[in-house]
Every structure is written in C-alpha cells, then in structure tokens.
C-alpha cells in the first residue's frame, strides 16, 4: 500500500494527549486525521479533525501535506 510510505512510524499517544495537542496547537500546525467511518465521526470527533475513512485513504493522500505533523485516529 502506498499510504504506508507516507507516514513515519511513531509511538502511540493517549486520547488525553491528543486532546492536549488540540488545546496547544492551531489547526494549521497539526492535522488530526480521523480514519473511522462517517457514522463514528458523526458520533464525536476532535474539533477540526479531517475525516478520511481508512478504506479511502489510499485514494485521498493528495489531501494531506507530507511535511505537516499528522495525528491519525
């Protein structure tokens, strides 16, 4: 899968750590990428999170900026 080459492996973070990132950074600094299904996203997501369901990620990589830090959940 070509999308695997796009991301640099990193350690996992907790939900609390993700919420802290939201509070400390503007949306232009960090992308919060929600890869769940639209119904899950509608049930609740981080403010400003971008929805790209995992099954669509490979075809939508052009929507992401490679040099921008991205938190995927």
Image (tube, rainbow, N blue to C red):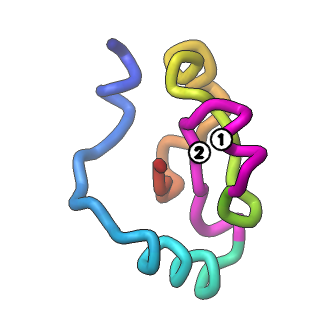
Q: Write down the residue under mark 2.
A: 34
Instruction: Please tell me whether mark 2 sits on a helix, a strand or a loop.
Output: strand
Residue marked by disc 1: 40
Q: Which one is in front, 14 or 40?
A: 40
Q: CA distance from mark 2 to mark 1?
A: 9 Å
**Residue at point 69%, 44% (across, down):** 41
Q: Quadrant of residue 34?
A: top right
Q: Are marks 2 and 1 in contact (CB under 8 Å)?
A: yes
Residue 46 location in percent, x, y? 66, 63
Asked if 2 appears above or below 62 in the picture, the reply is above
SS for callout 1: helix
Closer to the chain start, of discs 2 and 1, is 2
> Mark 1 packing: few (<14 Cα in 10 Å), some, or many (20+)?
few
Image location (x, y in percent) of residue 5:
30, 27
Could you tell me which residue is drawn at 61 percent across and 76 percent down? Answer: 22
Rendering coords of residue 21 (x, y %)? 53, 78
Q: Based on the displayed image, in which of its 4 quarters is residue 4 positioned?
A: top left
For the record, the magenta segment spans: 27-44
């Amino acid at each position: 899968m070509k999308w695997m080459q796009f991301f640099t492996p990193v350690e996992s973070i907790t939900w609390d750590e993700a919420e802290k990132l939201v509070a400390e950074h503007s949306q232009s600094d960090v992308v919060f990428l929600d890869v769940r299904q639209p119904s899950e996203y509608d049930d609740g997501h981080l403010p400003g999170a971008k929805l790209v369901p995992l099954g669509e990620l490979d075809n939508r990589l052009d929507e992401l900026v490679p040099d921008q830090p991205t938190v995927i959940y």
